[in-house]
Amino acid sequence: MKNLAVSVSPHIAQKSKTTRSIMLDVIIALTPALVMAVVYFGYHVVINAAVCMGSCFAFELLYTLAIKKDFSRKAVKESSCWDCSCLVTGLILALNLPRVIVVKSWDLNVYGTMPDVGGINRADYVLFGGDTVILCIIASLVAIALVKMLFGGIGKNFANPAATARVFLFLAFSSSFVATNTTGLGSLLSASSGATWLSGDKLTNGENLFLNLLTGNRGAAAVGETCMIALLLGYLYLSIKKIIDFRIPLIIIGSAAVMALLFDGVANGLTGGRLFENMLAHVMSGGLVFGAVFMATDYSTSPNTFWGSALFAFGIALFTMLIRCFGGYPEGMSFAILVMNVTVPLIDKFIVPRPFGYSKPAKAKGGEKA
């Protein structure tokens, strides 16, 4: 009997898996997307990632110390910030932002030499994005303090912190900033300057659409959503390490593909090859794959059962494609994730796991239970 023990939740099957190790695995999986974002969009991505990750770490540390009213060295060591979940939130948040954001009413940027011609995008000549740094800090505060820690910390937040912070920035500052993604190698390889190219007929954006989306030549509004190969590497890593259920991203992507064929045929009147090309553009661009792999699989904001998670994934795909095809916003993945995050308690209420060792009672002759 002395060899038996009762463990507290969460029950992790492999002893080597801890919250910290899982979060480090997620960071490793995000590394290919980060590297390709730097290759295509330049050093600004590194600055944004450092600011977001550093801010998230600092806000979680300060929050835990303030709640305990203990700023001793021991309290610092016992803070939840060391489980690295805040670093994952910061990195996902940074990869969900454009390279540079210029707030029209602010003047915190350092610019390089701009040509004396009209119609230029000043954001393309930002050497240091002061506006972007401030917005990264604000978004980190929302993600950690308001969404995560205010509800009790890791595992207790009802919504994905990074998705919520991105939606907050979009709603709070969309009318006052200009975003750009055209500097760096991406400017040589026709990287798009935003998610608006998701609207309408994708074939108007050039030849070799599939190759462009696969390698990253056709960028999205967020730097981490650019290269599908990098995202697939992250997906494979997390699936092989059994950090995520490999089926959930596939359900989201597959459902979105079917809905793209149905909805684009209605919304844009497309048929044949053009409809298929548009479906590929929907699936392989924007935040669909990134969100499906790194955000929809978040443990604390997704259902506890496979069938509940499958319904959750289908809902994300449905709302994303409804927003993209019929709404006024050409992206929609972050909004869809937040909407479905709210439904998770309801899903878990009606789709419950089968009790361990349960079997249906045998029926006696005549239809009566034995």
Image: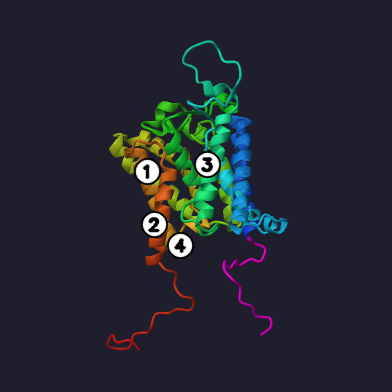
Of the two numbered discs 1 and 3 on the same chain, state the one appearing first in sequence: 3
State the residue lying farthest toward the front. Answer: 69
The alpha-carbon separation of the residues under discs 1 and 2 comes to: 18 Å
State the residue lying farthest toward the right. Answer: 73
Residue matched to label 4: 306
Residue matched to label 1: 321
Residue matched to label 2: 343
Give, as a three-letter code, the residue at label 2. Thr
Residue matched to label 3: 139
Of the two numbered discs 4 and 2 on the same chain, state the one appearing first in sequence: 4
Query: Which of pointers 1 and 2 indicates the residue nearer the eye?
Result: 2
The alpha-carbon separation of the residues under discs 3 and 4 comes to: 31 Å
* Helix, strand or loop at mark 4: helix
Q: Nearer the viewer, residue 88 or 314?
A: 88
For label 3, the crowd category at 10 Å Cα-Cα, with few meaning under 14, some 14 to 19 and many 20 or more, is many
For label 2, the crowd category at 10 Å Cα-Cα, with few meaning under 14, some 14 to 19 and many 20 or more, is some
Magenta stretch in the rendered image: 1-18
Mark number displayed over residue 262: none
Q: Residue 271 appears in which quarter of the rendering? A: top left
Give, as a three-letter code, the residue at label 1. Met
Q: Residue at x 44, y 69 (%)?
A: 353
Residue 309 percent across, percent down from the top left: 44, 59
Q: Residue at x 53, y 31 (%)?
A: 217
Of the two numbered discs 3 and 4 on the same chain, state the one appearing first in sequence: 3
* Helix, strand or loop at mark 1: helix
